[in-house]
Image (tube, helix red, strand yellow):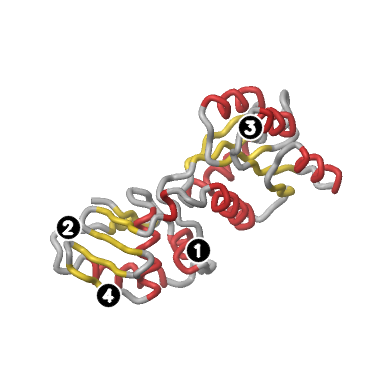
Amino acid sequence: MLPLGDMPRIGLVEDDLKISGLIKAGLEEHGFEVTTFTNGKTALLEFIRAPFDLVILDIMLPDLSGTEICRSLRARNSEMPILMLTALGTLDDKVGGFNSGADDYLVKPFHFRELLVRIEALLRRSRPAEKAHDSILSFEDLKMNTLSKEVQRAGTPIVLTAREFSLLEVFLRHPNQLLSRQYISEQAWDVNFDTGTNVVDVYVNFLRNKVEKGFGQKLIHTRINMGYILKA
């Protein structure tokens, strides 16, 4: 599970529009902000101008290769995490990618869940002391201490089960972001989401009864066929 307080910005360099669109849609559903590029020169200039939280590079690009982009960024002492995502899968290809400065290397075709896990692992390593790991989380009058496991709303203590606590933590780390049921299931409990069950809906209802009942303002809102969002 990767608890991130702010939406991580990912730069995706991929000249295959179909693959690029699928990756972008999948990552945005999981709470990432994705900017896509189809050529290497434009991408490199943007990465230098405005660093991203993570970069995903195809190697075979029409102008500047992913390997060249990686070398250029590392030559500028850039510490942005870089993931190579390419069809080139020989040992020499992988060694070349790592030697150019890549942090990880994933060969196409790939399972999206593996891509997501690798992205989260890279972000965890690159953001060890950032706000993402703060122990005090709050939204409006709702507060959580992740160390003492205490939750309060408007100063009133709220007792949650372990599952409810994990669910609330996901919402508090992603305020004002629409979260899919699959994302919630994976982040809160580190389990695969089964579309044939309503376990997420059940626990959202449990949580609502504890953090909203008796309080004036509703915080957890439903988006039909899409998921849930924590907002005022």
Percent across and percent down for residue 22 are 58, 44
Q: Which is more N-terminal, label 2 or label 4? A: 4
Kindly identify which residue carries mark 1.
186
Nearer to us in this view, 176 or 21:
176
Disc 1 marks a residue whose amino acid type is Glu
Q: Quadrant of residue 69?
A: top right
Under tag 1, what secondary structure? helix
Residue 105 lies left or right of residue 208; in this view the side is right
Relative vertical location of residue 149 with respect to residue 73 in this rendering, above or below: below
Front residue of 228/126: it is 126
Q: Position of residue 58 (x, y in %)?
A: 69, 37
Percent position (x, y) of residue 158? 24, 71
Between the C-alphas of marks 1 and 3, the distance is 34 Å
In three-dimensional space, the C-alpha distance between marks 4 and 3, rounded to whole angstroms, equals: 47 Å
Q: Which residue is mark 4?
A: 159
Q: Residue at x 37, y 64 (%)?
A: 146
